[in-house]
Image: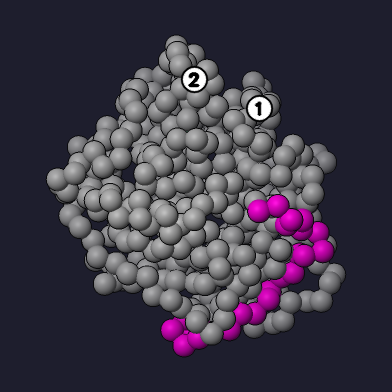
Amino acid sequence: MKNKRVLYALLVLALAGTSACAQERDSGTDGAIGSEQRTEPSGVPASGQNPEGSVGASGPVSAKLTRVFEGTSVDRPTAIEARADRIYVTEQAGRIVALRTDEADEGGETETVLDLTDRVYAEGSEQGLLGLAFDPNHEDNGFVYVNYTTQTHTVIARHRMPKDGQAAAGGGNDGTVLLTFKQPYANHNGGQLAFGPDGYLYIGTGDGGSGGDPQGNGQDKQSLLGKILRIDVGKTDGDKAYAIPADNPFAKGGGAKEIYAYGLRNPWRFSFDAESGELWAADVGQNQFEEIDIIVRGGNYGWNLKEAEVCFEPASGCEAEAAQAVVIDPIWSYGREEGQSVTGGYVYRGEAITGLAGRYVYGDYGSGAIWALKKMTDGRYGNELLLQSEMNITTFGRDVQGELYLTSAEGELYRLDPK
Ligand SMILES: [Ca+2]
């Protein structure tokens, strides 16, 4: 899915040299945006900082991946969402398929519940149907929201999904385009959609693509690219099919009203902690670092002034400008020894895996590593290698019980189980 495809066999070898130990590093992005909360520069992150394997979060957790829905596969899976007794997987070409979780261990079968292939353009490796979110009132209105690309644009649209058990209605589902904006290059389209605990729809957009953000979209407050956007899909506003939440940072001026946070490069996956409501985003890096950010309203996450904790444009001496721009450094980042393209996951709130509760589970598309990251009592973050999947992980998802799933680029589905 990302722009840094690699031979993961090589990476497995590389990873074999890294210890499965926890790492610790200073953190500091708690609270709302404001200069007093700005993260202190934390220097260049190094991998394997803690070779003795000291305990990070709160001791090691054992988990394994179980292949599920073995009787089926999905084509180029990009997102997993859940409702009732099913998970729904988006296929990059434009289909949404449903699988019953109670059939996960017995083969299962896919049912196409929405087919948008007539309007989705998926030629580029990062183009296609990239995100799905169920309306908070889906039970009543049947609405879902999708994030997809055409050849030239990103489209955020609302469609009606047939009730469970009914076949997808043939045609006649034109949907409503809520928001669309131009994509200058084929890559870095973001793609995640999720409703926050506030009931608003959050949208991840990439910086528009190419490499290094040549248009400077990440720091451009007038551009919708390189952002987390937030809109109110429960209301309309003039000719707009959505409204702007009154407390969006630029609702009263200073930037595009849809912006919630900025300075992101390609936040392929983000999610809300079902318990705390915190927004965790994994931002795919450029040349050196992959990063995990906790997104706050109005936050500036640095790109392309910085790549993770280091200067990017300019390559050195960005500190004064970053301070002026109130850049928030990631809570965690990792270098090329550990992976090439972060795939964000979820704060685990399921019950099956003892000790994993409250930890953010995420992985790397290139290396196949899956980690658990947790804020410790002293406010720092501890990171632990959960397992090595040896897969190109395209997305994580959770069922309604909060158990975690992931998909491989090959279209296989796995569930994270206790070991
Ligand atoms: Ca950043």
- The residue drawn where x is 40% and y is 34% is 330
What is the x, y in percent for residue 374?
A: 29, 48
Location of residue 99 with respect to 145 vertically, above or below: below
What is the x, y in percent for residue 174?
A: 83, 62
- Is residue 197 in sight in this rendering? no
59 sits to left or right of 211? left
What is the x, y in percent for residue 338?
A: 37, 47
80 sits to left or right of 241? left
Q: Which residue is mark 2?
A: 315
- The residue drawn where x is 59% and y is 60% is 78
Q: Point out the image quarter for the N terminus.
A: bottom right
In the image, what residue type sits under mark 1?
Pro
Location of residue 91 with respect to 102 vertically, above or below: above
Residue range in magenta is 102-125
Q: Which residue is mark 1?
A: 214
Q: Is residue 119 magenta?
A: yes
Task: Out of 168 and 363, give the one closest to the viewer.
Answer: 363
Q: Is residue 310 magenta?
A: no
